[in-house]
Amino acid sequence: MTIAGRRSAFATLTGERKSGLILAFMADTKLIKEKVDIVDLISEYVALKPAGVNHKGLCPFHREKSPSFMVSRERQSWHCFGCSKGGDIFSFVQEIEGMEFSEALKYLANRAGVPLDNYRSEIGSNLRNRIKEINENAANFFHNFLLKMPAAASARDYLSGRKVKPETITEWLIGYVPDQWDLLTNWLTKKGFAIDDLVASGLTIKKADAVSGSMRGYYDRFRGRVMFPIWDTHGSVVGFTGRVLVETENSGGKYVNTPVTPVYDKSSVIFGLNRAKSEIKTKDLIVVVEGQMDTIACHEAGMKNVVASSGTAMTETQVKLLKRYSQNLALAFDMDAAGIEAAERGILIALREGMNVRVIRIPDGAGKDPDECLKKNPEIWFQAVKNAEDVMAWFLEKATKGRDLKLPKEKQMASDIFLPKIALVPYAVERDYWLQKLAETINVGMDVLREDLPRFRKNPQGVVVGRKQVVSSVPEKTATASAPIEMTRSEEMLEMLFALLLRFPKVLQDYWGKLENIAPVLSTSHYANLYFEAKKLYNKGNILDLEELHKALEIVENGSEMMSLLGMKGDLLFQDFDDRSAMQEAEALFNQIHADWLGARRKQIQLEMISAEKAGDKDVVARLMNEFIKLV
């Protein structure tokens, strides 16, 4: 979103409030940008490497193998030359977190330590922010009820029986709500929260016969349950899981979760990631368990790089979220049929994303899950994680176990099960390794397997697995910003030429005079303003000072942005060049641009000559012929 767009959006929020509030807002956004370094922020999501004065990495908004995503610390901006997305810290957080501007503003202001007291009510008027505030209050209510109320004695006994330490209860804000009809709803409305917002948060359920404007027909979703808050990656409470203490016909199942709301979708949230992300980066390993108690038990035991899938298959959104912090994934899941099937769906997505996936196996008799294993013998769990098996080896064992591999049909069945997994691996060397392993295991030639592999390549709808088709439950995120601008080959080369010359001031100075030979191209291109301003400066004293050029372009529409993008592109493409190789590259680009322009102009002259001859205009024919001869 542009600054103008932000002002417009903010004006909508504030209605008729005075322009002084807008000025305060603009000053605060500027202060936030000064305090939050864009490279540090984006490095939390993207692995960035220095590229000249800028930084580069793989774009988080589209799939690419070679980096085209650039971040400028000097300009505090980012841009992807692959999908054309770009902007500042606010637009980046909005895009990658799916936040509205007011949410991104609140998050970055908190990060920067900049108070937004002047217009806190306007920021809070956003529904998502209101729901997060409701959830935070509810979490504190549940937690305090657990710690202080006699009616929570059974819940305290349950947690004590699970050997959950008091400090863990406090750290994870574990709570309890008694089996009462509308206790929480009444408490929250008395604190001033609107009943419609409570319904939107998922904490309150509205009956069909509810009376608008009164409390009749509204009741609590969670009743008689131990409550576990669910946080997003930034530490905001977005939802809850409630575990019933006593199951009855009307208790609604052992676990109840917050439904889909404007801030919570189970398919895009990872339990515990807000607490684990730092340790995940340090250890370069994500340990994924199924249950929330498993996660809490692991953290309590000192293994803090653990998160929970909450008993469901990992989605593409969740895998991409985890991939921000590490490429290495170790999974622990129930080895029953349902657990394996759910885990496999997530594993296939992770493999397709190029992650290194391993399977954690708890030895027989050591516990049915990580929590139980840790209670019996923590060392066994730590060893199980350390000795986690490569998921491809696990898949191969599954595909061949119990088969008579002397029989051709059995060989083919094993191959049909394992080859689709190999097809998902995005790296050729790794694919070749597992083809070799399969060939050795079923005793067939690798050429035969290579011939069979294309049958299992990804199609547009999903991934062919044997004769079944597994379709990702969450569509891949597509670019929502401006699509890449279609440029001709000459325009692309012209952009590269400017990026090169601006990165090498000496080459630019030496080469400037030659650019006049492609003046017709330059004067009609996207970079015409840059060319004309540079020409003015050069004509003043036969010197082209980059600092002066930057200043001159600051008052030209999009001039600063243009220089910033060219600077980033120069660092992206020409980081390893020196002045000599830069001059050679400039010469090659110039010659190709010039040749393309000559060819296009000659064709144009020929068409104009035909038209002039038909009109009998001999003077025009003579002039065009003259120009054509000169060009040749």
Image: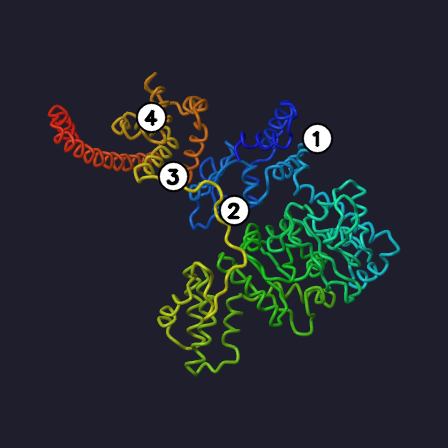
Q: Position of residue 31 (x, y in %)?
A: 61, 29
Q: Quadrant of residue 572?
A: top left
- Which residue in the protein does label 2 denote? 47
Comes first in the chain, label 2 or label 1: 2
Q: Residues within 10 Å of mark 4 (few under 14, many from 20)?
A: some
Q: Amino acid at mark 1?
A: Asp
- Which residue in the protein does label 3 denote? 574
Q: Position of residue 227 (x, y in %)?
A: 75, 55
Q: Nearer the viewer, mark 1 or mark 4?
A: 1
Whether the residues at callouts 1 and 4 have beta carbons within 8 Å, the answer is: no
Q: Is residue 421 left or right of residue 223?
A: left
Kind of element beneath mark 2? loop
Q: Amino acid at mark 2?
A: Ala
Kind of element beneath mark 4? helix
Kindly report the distance in space between the C-alpha atoms of the residues bearing marks 3 and 1: 46 Å
- Which residue in the protein does label 1 denote? 117
Residue 428 in the image: above or below residue 630: below
Whether the residues at callouts 3 and 1 have beta carbons within 8 Å, the answer is: no
Q: Is residue 534 left or right of residue 121?
A: left
Comes first in the chain, label 4 or label 2: 2
Residue shown at the point (44%, 62%) measured from the top left? 430
Kindly report the distance in space between the C-alpha atoms of the residues bearing marks 3 and 4: 18 Å
Q: Position of residue 221 (x, y in %)?
A: 74, 55
Q: Position of residue 433 (x, y in %)?
A: 43, 66
- Which residue in the protein does label 4 denote? 509
